[in-house]
Amino acid sequence: MPNLSCSVTKCKHNSDHMCVLDSIKISGGDCKEGTRCDSFSEGNSAKNQTGEVAERTHVYCLAKDCDFNNSCDCVADSIDICPCNTGSCCDDTECRSYTK
């Protein structure tokens, strides 16, 4: 499982740049900008929620052309999810660690 860092502060699962979910789903591909975090959920920071924050998170990845994709599991040591636009939907997130 990758060490996951997330800078999408408008996501309710984000707690100090870490995700409170134990698994996320990345879809898209062909380029870094074509990926997105399908687990994104708009809301305030997760600081007031009961989710446990873990440095490592299972990443289910549908970006089949990414070097780190092994049968839809991300095998990168670490990944970074970031906002790519000013909007607040999963289409405005991307996996910065995507490598073709």
Image (tube, grey):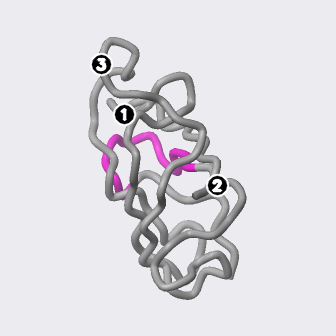
x, y percent for residue 5? 61, 41
Quadrant, the N terminus: bottom right
Q: Is residue 3 above or below residue 65?
A: above
Toward the top, the furthest residue is 48
**Magenta-drawn stretch contains 85:** yes
Q: Earlier in the sequence, mark 3 or mark 2?
A: 3
Local secondary structure at mark 1:
loop
Name the amino acid, label 3. Answer: Gln
Q: Earlier in the sequence, mark 3 or mark 1?
A: 1
Q: Residue at x 53, y 33 (%)?
A: 18
x, y percent for residue 70? 56, 82
Instruction: Classify mark 1: residues with Cα within 10 Å, few (<14), some (14-19) or many (20+).
Output: many
Q: Nearer the viewer, residue 24 or 86?
A: 24
User: What's the CA distance linking mark 3 and mark 1?
Assistant: 9 Å
User: What's the CA distance linking mark 3 and mark 2?
Assistant: 23 Å
Q: Is residue 10 rendered to the left or right of residue 8? A: left
Q: Which mark is residue 13?
A: 1
Local secondary structure at mark 3:
loop
Q: How many numbered discs?
A: 3
Instruction: Classify mark 3: residues with Cα within 10 Å, few (<14), some (14-19) or many (20+).
Output: few
Q: Is residue 27 above or below residue 87?
A: below
- Residue under circle 3? 49
x, y percent for residue 26? 43, 65
Q: Is residue 91 rendered to the left or right of residue 77? A: left
Name the amino acid, label 2. Answer: Ile
Local secondary structure at mark 2:
strand
Q: Is residue 83 rendered to the left or right of residue 11? A: right
Q: Residue at x 48, y 47 (%)?
A: 85
Q: Which mark is residue 79?
A: 2
Name the amino acid, label 1. Answer: His
